[in-house]
Amino acid sequence: MKQDNDLRNNLKSIRTRLGMSQQDLANLAGVTRQTISGVESGQYAPSVAITLRLAKALGCQVEDLFWLERDLPEIEAVLSKPLPTGQQTRVSLARVGGQWVAYPLIGKDAFRQDMIPADGEAVAVSHPLVEGEDESPINPDKVRVRLLDDNLETLHNTVVIAGCAPVISLWARATERWHPQLRVQFNFANSMSALHSLCRGEAHIAGMHLYDSETGEYNTPFVRDVLAGREAVLITLGVWEEGLLVKSGNPMGIRTVRDLVSEGATIVNREIGAGTRLLLEQTLQKEQIPFNAVQGFDYIVTSHQDVAQAVVLGVADAGISTASVATAFGLGFIPLHQSRYDLVILKEYLEEAPVQQLLSTLGHRMVHSQFEILGGYDISKIGEVVATV
């Protein structure tokens, strides 16, 4: 019998896992080797009798061997960043501000310590063919996403946070334990990038820690400038210690940013828009130290973890990050500044149920205990609305 186009099987994987050849399985099931080959290749749909004999021979259920491929839905989504030309790409999905947003799982965005599961596979969307054109042009901003399952409820219950604070992932996991139906997607982005992502409708929440030395305010002046009249609230996640990460035991005796120059230390820096880079620049300016006087000022990495890793591996002698990151990597820490980390949320998202569920957990002991054990993180004001714009 010719294979049903919707019938799928994993006969070969189960057979090989048990160390059987096609002939071995054929002998046990009382069929020919050609039958086994035809089933595995999808060229032959076995009868009910053969299906039962194969399952018995392999010691499993029929459902373990065969299943019907369902017609999974496709949706149109806006890309958070461009896709490689002509390439199908794994993406994660979320509903933000009334539209679907697709987040390509490419490079570091595809991994934390393990690979991040995808919600679907994206292909570029073509515009309708215009008379006189040879082929339909590709719309670089939108994709068609073929979902990998039909659990749209999970996608609707996804809250997207853009930010760089490692504690966000702790908050997300604790929240998902409290609300199993809720999914929190954490997209790494420095403070300014997170704010712009919020403004573009790619995130529900932006995390940031930028200090305005002219006004003495945290975050609010930057939010006003970028959102340009859109209404938002700022909710404090915590206050963390920022400073210099150095090798364990501080062998160079670094105590201040001036020591970076006098001791000839090499640093690792963050990209423009990162709160820790802004802190370094403001501290150097206060001490009237030219940026180019510090070795490694132009050596850029893109996360707190990358800064710590550079110091651990000896690529750099120092870098700006937080006390909790220093502790996690077993590094020394010289405090320079206390910075308030705020969550920026557009008011239009505040009434959405998934966002409300996430924010409600800021008062939970489970979340507090995860933050407190890190060290260098003051959560006495967690959950407080510190500004509206």
Image (tube, rainbow, N blue to C red):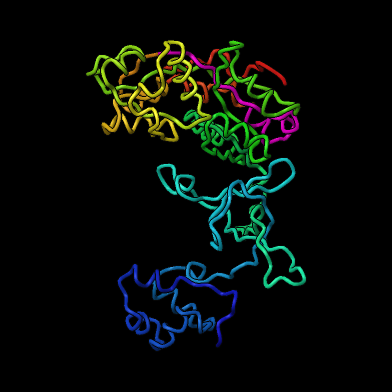
In the displayed structure, 42 sits above or below 81; it is: below
In the displayed structure, 239 sits above or below 112; it is: above
Give 222 or 97, whichever is nearer the viewer: 222
Residue 41: horizontal and vertical position, in percent? Answer: 46, 79
Residue located 54% across and 34% down the image: 172
In the displayed structure, 18 sits above or below 38; it is: above
* Magenta highlight range: 336-359
356 on left or right of 20? right
For the N terminus, the quadrant is: bottom right
Residue located 59% across and 80% down the image: 4
| Outermost residue to the left | 251
Residue 250: horizontal and vertical position, in percent? Answer: 25, 18
Decide whether residue 351 is among the magenta residues. Answer: yes
For the C terminus, the quadrant is: top right
Please identify the quarter of the rendering in which residue 69 is found.
bottom right
152 on left or right of 43? right
306 on left or right of 196? left
Give 286 or 229, whichever is nearer the viewer: 286
Residue located 48% across and 77% down the image: 52
Residue located 29% across and 25% down the image: 317
Decide whether residue 343 is among the magenta residues. Answer: yes
Give 50 or 179, whichever is nearer the viewer: 179
Residue 99: horizontal and vertical position, in percent? Answer: 72, 46
User: Total of numbered circles in the picture?
Assistant: 0
Residue 332: horizontal and vertical position, in percent? Answer: 30, 19
In the displayed structure, 265 sits above or below 315; it is: above
Give 333 or 383, whichever is nearer the viewer: 333
